[in-house]
Amino acid sequence: EAGVTQFPSHSVIEKGQTVTLRCDPISGHDNLYWYRRVMGKEIKFLLHFVKESKQDESGMPNNRFLAERTGGTYSTLKVQPAELEDSGVYFCASSPGHVIEAFFGQGTRLTVV
Amino acid sequence: LAKTTQPISMDSYEGQEVNITCSHNNIATNDYITWYQQFPSQGPRFIIQGYKTKVTNEVASLFIPADRKSSTLSLPRVSLSDTAVYYCLASWAGFQKLVFGTGTRLLVSP
C-alpha cells in the first residue's frame, strides 16, 4: 500500500513568488492534515480536511496560504506571495476516521530566498 | 489540548533499554497518550498509543500510571537505527489535531 506522498521534496523560490505543494494521501483516508516546521521551531498544525471540507484551519498563518482538496482526494497548499519566514518543512498526513494514528509524508522542504 | 514535557535529549548504547518519560499534568479525561518517532528528512511515524496502564506492541511499550499525569515510552534493546526524535502527545481522539512539543532526541551509540 502506497503511503502519503508529497511533491516536490524540495523547492527553492524567490521572495514574492508563488509555490504550490501537493499531497497525495493514502487511498481511502478521509482526513488530510497539513503541518509545518519552520527553522528551529516545533511542528505546527496548519489545517485539517475531512474529505473536501475544511474541518479546522485555525493554524493557517495568514491569507497568503491557500489549501484546497478538490474531490476529496489529493490536496494542494499554495503560498502566494512567499515570504522569507515561510521557509521550513511542510508535512502532510492522512488518517482514516476518528483515530489518532496519522500517517505522514516525507515532507516538502521549502526555501524562500 | 494538554501540554507535554519531555527531556530534550537522551543518550544510550546498543542493546540497552531506553525509557523516555513524558509529563502531562493537565491531561484531559478524553485525551490519549500517543508517541511518534521521526528520523531526519522524514515525517513523524506513529509508534504507540495508550489511555492507561500498559500497552505493548512490536516496537515499544507504553506505561501510564493511574493518575495519568505522566507516561513512559520503553524501547527494548535499542539499536543504532533507533536514533531519532521521539514525540509525546496528548490528543483527543475526536479532535485529531496533533500538538507536537520539542520531542526527545535519542542518540544510540555503538
Image: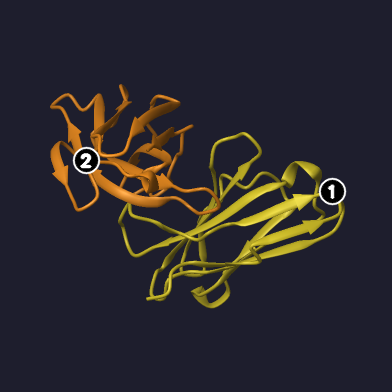
Chain colours: A yellow, B orange
Residue B76: assigned label: 2
Residue A11: x and y in percent read 73, 60
Q: In the structure shown, which secondary structural element does the residue marked by tag 1 occupy?
A: loop
Residue B5: assigned label: none
Residue type at mark 1: give it: Val
Residue A113: assigned label: 1
Quadrant location, the N terminus of chain B:
top left
> From mark 1 to mark 2, how far is it between C-alphas?
44 Å
Residue B71 in view in this figure:
yes
Q: In this view, does B25 lie above or below B99?
A: above
Quadrant location, the C terminus of chain B:
top left
Same subunit, tags 1 and 2: no
The residue lying toward the viewer, choosing from A10 and A29, is A10
Q: In this view, does B93 lie to the left or right of A66?
A: left
Residue found at the very far front of the displayed protein: B110
Q: Is residue B29 above or below residue A37?
A: above
Residue type at mark 2: give it: Pro
Q: In the structure shown, which secondary structural element does the residue marked by tag 2 occupy?
A: loop
Residue A103: x and y in percent read 41, 59
Residue A79 in view in this figure:
no
Residue for point 57% across, 44% down: A59
Residue for point 86% across, 54% down: A14
Residue found at the very far top of the displayed protein: B25
Residue for point 54% across, 73% down: A74
Chain ID at mark 1 = A
The residue lying toward the viewer, choosing from A46 and A112, is A112
Q: In this view, does B104 lie to the left or right of B77?
A: right
The residue lying toward the viewer, choosing from B54 and B17, is B17
Residue B4: x and y in percent read 38, 28
Q: Is residue A67 left or right of residue A31?
A: right
Quarter where residue B87 is shown: top left
